[in-house]
Amino acid sequence: MRLGNSDLSIFSSALLCFATFVTAPSEAFPQQPWYLAAFDRVLRVAVNNDTDAASQKDAAKQIEQAYLSRLTKAEEGTITLRGQVPSESDLKILQGVAAATSPGASVIDKSRVNANVPDRDTWLAAMTFALRQLGKLQSGSAVLHNTAIIIEGVTKADDDFSAVQKKLREEAPKGLKLQVALKPHDVHPFVWIAQLQQGTLNLTGHVPDQQDQILCAYARELFQNVKVNNAMEVAKGEPQDWLAATKLSLEMLSLLFSGNVAISDNVIKLDGIYSSPAMVQLLSAYSKRLPPAFRLETRITEPVAKAPAPPEDVSLAAHEAQSPTSMNP
């Protein structure tokens, strides 16, 4: 049963007449429970129906206003356009931008024309921006929903992941709600290197996203008086337990006077000179804490112990007898 505003007025009038009829003899308003319950039930149905109708109308209006366009770039370079475009001329503009930003890429059109775009200028600026960004990626997609756009993808192998992310956000048109979900490119082997020499620790090679700062902070904690230089490049393809193994590698490097540690996938190579003979046993303890999948290879020498300078009256023969003794294994 559905009652609009006019139906509710008629029904209320009918109830008023009914109430007048039943109360005329006694001049009293009827108090029967069945009457009150029926009246309340009808009012609830009328109000709920009107609310549901308004909600359905608002939902339908929102659906009509929703304008969705999608761009997809495959690894082989094919760009596919789906969803809605304001006009055929706008479609040709996008095809021209795609040819300029992704030279040699083929463009597949699976869109449909819908002139009811909320803001054509914003739409065109967003889609042009999306094509420029996809041209910088190995593969990815851009979904525009009215003035909100989501860009996903994988960066190219030779590009700096952090720089690409930063540039993308800087180039976004004003008034556009941007969400970015990029991933770094895969590299194999996944190589990371730390070099300790002359009061400086240089960190280079590949590092998973958002873990470079973790390693830099950990290195500064281990090497208190050493300058830490970060030249690591964000990439993907690291083995399981990579961060734990890398932190432990820095701990082993801290036992050395100078040297370097390199991790290539699951193999850790440690080279250098011990800071003191006592560090030999410490290294053995550290190596036992490595994650199971990692293997350690070392090439480390012990420091050479220098003999004290002889007194002036010592003979040349005695001086030669006290020449430095090597402590190399």
Image: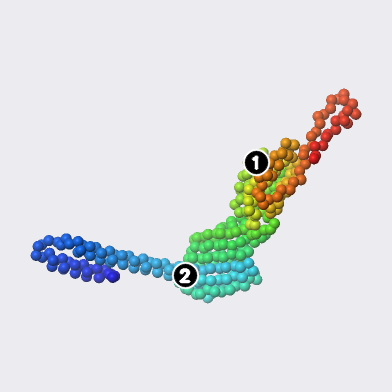
Say left or right for 98 vs 11. right
Up-down relation of residue 178 to residue 83 (above or below): above
Please give the residue where the numbered disc 1 appears in the rendered image: 222
What residue appears at the point 48 percent right and 73 percent down from the top-left corner? 114
Residue type marked 1: Leu
Residue 318 place in picture, x, y as percent: 88, 28
Please give the residue where the numbered disc 2 appears in the rendered image: 117
* Mark-to-mark CA distance, 2 and 1: 58 Å
Up-down relation of residue 86 to residue 323 (above or below): below
Evaluate whether residue 178 shows in this view.
Answer: yes
User: How many other residues sit within 10 Å of disc 2, few (<14), some (14-19) or many (≥20)?
Assistant: many
Quadrant in the picture for the C terminus: top right
Q: Quadrant of residue 99?
A: bottom right
Q: Are marks 2 and 1 in contact (CB under 8 Å)?
A: no
Element at badge 1?
helix
Total count of labels: 2
Q: Residue furthest top?
A: 313
Say left or right for 76 vs 122. right
Residue type marked 2: Val
Give the mark nearer the N terminus: 2 vs 1. Answer: 2
What residue appears at the point 87 percent right and 29 percent down from the top-left corner? 319
What residue appears at the point 65 percent right and 59 percent down from the top-left corner? 186
Relative to the observer, which residue lies in front, 172 or 209? Answer: 209
What residue appears at the point 34 percent right and 66 percent down from the top-left corner? 52
Q: Quadrant of residue 46?
A: bottom left
Residue 78 place in picture, x, y as percent: 61, 70
Evaluate whether residue 263 shows in this view.
Answer: no
Quadrant in the picture for the N terminus: bottom left
Residue 236 place in picture, x, y as percent: 63, 57
Relative to the observer, which residue lies in front, 168 or 251? Answer: 251
Say left or right for 267 vs 146. right
- Give the foreground label among 2 and 1: 1
